[in-house]
Amino acid sequence: MMQYKGYVGEVEVDDEAHVIFGTLVGIRHIVTFEGETVEEARKAFHDSVDDYLALCAERGTEPEKPFSGKFMVRVSPELHRDAVYMARRHDMSLNKFVERALNVATATTATVPRVAPAAEPERSYATGPKAKAKAGGKKAVSVDAERVTASGQIPARASKAKAGKVKRPSG
């Protein structure tokens, strides 16, 4: 994981392509980055975050804020009841009880499996040879929301470019 300006990048290695690539997590837009070394990937991550923020400013839209600290959890009525009783027994709110339970669970978990986001992404901001080919050879961004929506998964890697910066679609 990489962090920059409040954004988190999830990193993977493609041994066959000899690249380190990743995506921003916690937002609906798909913003990618890539490099051949850790330093290149880190710089590409920083560049992608900066480009995402600049694109939002240019469009006059608020950039998505990752991890607001608020989320809805659905549990069985019995678990809900038991959690409320346990929180009262320890003289704390349900929110504080759940926060402590999550702290314990995340502190003792070595790795967390990758889970597809519940919210549908708006666009895929991927650059590189594959994205260029999909755009008919133009310097454009591939809008890949259909593939993400249809499969329910974020594509593992959108391109093999050195840095998958956020770019505005042309035309």
Image: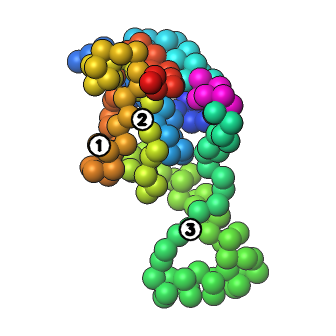
Three-letter code for the amino acid on which mark 1 is drawn = Arg
Cα separation between marks 3 and 1: 26 Å
Q: Residues within 10 Å of mark 3 (few under 14, many from 20)?
A: few
Q: Nearer the viewer, mark 3 or mark 1?
A: 1
Q: Which residue does the numbered mark 3 point to in the structure image?
A: 72
Q: Can the viewer see residue 24 in this picture? A: yes
Three-letter code for the amino acid on which mark 3 is drawn = Met
Position in image of residue 23 (x %, y %): 46, 33
- Labelled pair 3, 1 in contact (Cβ < 8 Å): no
Q: Residue at x 32, y 23 (%)?
A: 135
Residue most extreme to the left:
16
Residue most extreme to the right:
91
- Labelled pair 1, 2 in contact (Cβ < 8 Å): yes
Q: Nearer the viewer, mark 3 or mark 2?
A: 2
Mark 3 secondary-structure assignment: loop
Residue 140 position by quadrant: top left
Q: Can the viewer see residue 49 in this picture? A: no
Whether 56 is among the magenta residues is yes
Cα separation between marks 3 and 2: 25 Å
Q: Which residue does the numbered mark 1 point to in the structure image?
A: 147
Mark 2 secondary-structure assignment: strand
Q: Which residue does the numbered mark 2 point to in the structure image?
A: 124
Instruction: Please state if 150 lies on the left or on the right of 163 as rendered.
Output: left
